[in-house]
Image: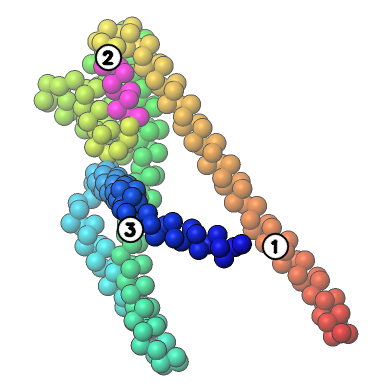
Amino acid sequence: MIAVGGALAGLGLAALLRRGWLAPIAGELVAGRRRSLAAVRARAAVRHRHDLALLGVAAEVQAARAISWALAGAGVGGVVALGVLATAGSTALAAAVVAVGAAGGSLAPGARLRAAAARRRRDVLHAFSSYLDLVQVLLAGGAGVETALVAAAEAGDGWAFERLRESVVRARSARRSIWDELARFGARVGIPQIEEVAGSVRLAGEHGARVRLSLAARADSLRQRQMGELEAAAQSATERMGVPMVGLFLAFIVLVGYPAVALVLDGL
């Protein structure tokens, strides 16, 4: 029965292929796969540009770092390949070791760039949340909207506040809205939260009371999101801490039980 069912299924598939009925389906699958891969590559390229802009690194410098690390990885792989040739005498395996070393070296700068950009984004979000709180305090004290934005940017220090001050100074020099410049900054470095806050406040107008209410709502939402991310990171770290404890427990069990198992096996 199994053989007959397989034969019938094969004949039916062959008939469908011969008539060309499966060609549109296969074409759609291939096209969808290509579109998904293109979308993934496009998102990766955009994130890479955002990371470079956030860290202030030129694309040429990052490419030079990747080439240097690839050469260094190839050199380390060449040293290991010499040992492989001396012991195993396999040229193909030695070439594979060199290729793996070069590939790993070329990927290392990109991984470091993404990790540094992720840390910078967290710092910028924390600084921006503090900036919004300062703006609210100044507006509640009777300051104007533009005065509050400028004074709040000048009140903080650190790298993130320097970038915020640069955006404020650029907006005042070009006679543009500060919120528009902050939205451009968020879009340039890949931080959508800043774009959302800037757009929400821009829709609220230029009246102090409405801006203060909008800022209060957006700052509270941003703060809640940051607290959720911090709690998730802490929970993940707590779970990772349990892995070494489980490993130590298993090692202890093996250490204690090995003599007894060895005696049983010797008795057999």
197 within the magenta span: yes
Classify the position of the N terminus by image quarter.
bottom right
Q: Which residue is mark 3?
A: 18
Q: Residues within 10 Å of mark 3 (few under 14, many from 20)?
A: few
In the image, is 263 to the left or to the right of 80? right
Give residue 248's mark: 1
| Front-lying residue, 157 or 213 | 213
Residues marked 1 and 3 touching at CB (< 8 Å):
no
Give residue 94's mark: none
Q: Which residues are magenta?
A: 193-202
- Write down the quadrant of residue 256 in the picture: bottom right
In the rendered structure, which disc, 1 or 2, sits on the residue that comes first in sequence?
2
Q: Secondary structure at mark 3?
A: helix
In the image, is 47 to the left or to the right of 218? left
Q: Which residue is mark 2?
A: 203
Q: Position of residue 110 (x, y in %)?
A: 32, 56
Classify the position of the C terminus by image quarter.
bottom right
Q: Residues within 10 Å of mark 2 (few under 14, many from 20)?
A: few
Residue type at the position of mark 2: Leu
Residue at position x 46%, y 61% in the image: 10
Work out how far the residue at label 1 is from the one at label 3, CA to CA, in angstroms.
61 Å
Q: Position of residue 95 (x, y in %)?
A: 34, 81
Residue at position x 21%, y 24% in the image: 180
Q: Is residue 51 visible?
A: no
